[in-house]
Amino acid sequence: MLCMCTPAGQDEYFTRIGDVVAGKDAPPPRLSQDELTERRRRAGRVGVVLPQRVPVIGRPVGTWLTV
């Protein structure tokens, strides 16, 4: 995957909170609530705030996924 990041420092964000996966077709890892909390803490160290809820693409407007 090619990822261009602005502002500078986003590469550090991916390094700190990212998970190594088996391959490019591997499903995303399923994280426990404790693991999600830890990722939010790590993200905060580099100035990134992870949302508690995100809209679900392909669903009716107003459908949210709690993460």
Image (tube, rainbow, N blue to C red):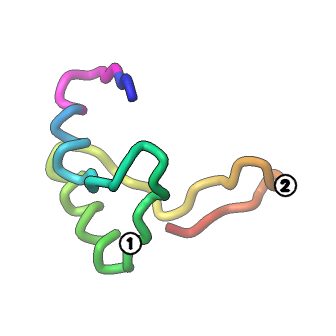
Mark 2 vs mark 1: which is more N-terminal? Answer: 1
Q: Which residue is denoted by mark 1 in the rendering?
A: 31
Compare residues 5 and 62 and report the one nearer the observer. Answer: 5
x%, y% of residue 15?
Answer: 18, 44
Q: Which residue is denoted by mark 2 in the rendering?
A: 60
User: How dense is the environment of label 1, judged by Cα within 10 Å: few (below 14), some, or many (20 and up)?
Assistant: few
Q: Amino acid at mark 1?
A: Leu
* Position above or below: 30 against 11: below
Q: CA distance from mark 2 to mark 1?
A: 25 Å
Region in magenta: 4-10
The residue at the point 75 percent across, 61 percent down is 63
The residue at the point 48 percent across, 47 percent down is 25
Q: Amino acid at mark 2?
A: Pro
The part of the image, by quadrant, that contains residue 14 is top left
Lateral position of residue 3 relative to residue 19, left or right = right
Lateral position of residue 54 relative to residue 57, left or right = left
**From the image, which quarter does the N terminus lie in?**
top left
Q: Secondary structure at mark 2?
A: loop
User: How dense is the environment of label 2, judged by Cα within 10 Å: few (below 14), some, or many (20 and up)?
Assistant: few
The residue at the point 49 percent across, 67 percent down is 67
x%, y% of residue 49?
Answer: 34, 50
The residue at the point 24 percent across, 32 percent down is 10
Q: Is residue 32 magenta?
A: no
Compare residues 17 and 28 and report the one nearer the observer. Answer: 28
Q: Is residue 5 magenta?
A: yes
Q: Which label number is shown at residue 18? A: none
Compare residues 22 and 34 and report the one nearer the observer. Answer: 22
Q: Secondary structure at mark 1?
A: loop
Q: Main secondary structure of the magenta part?
A: loop
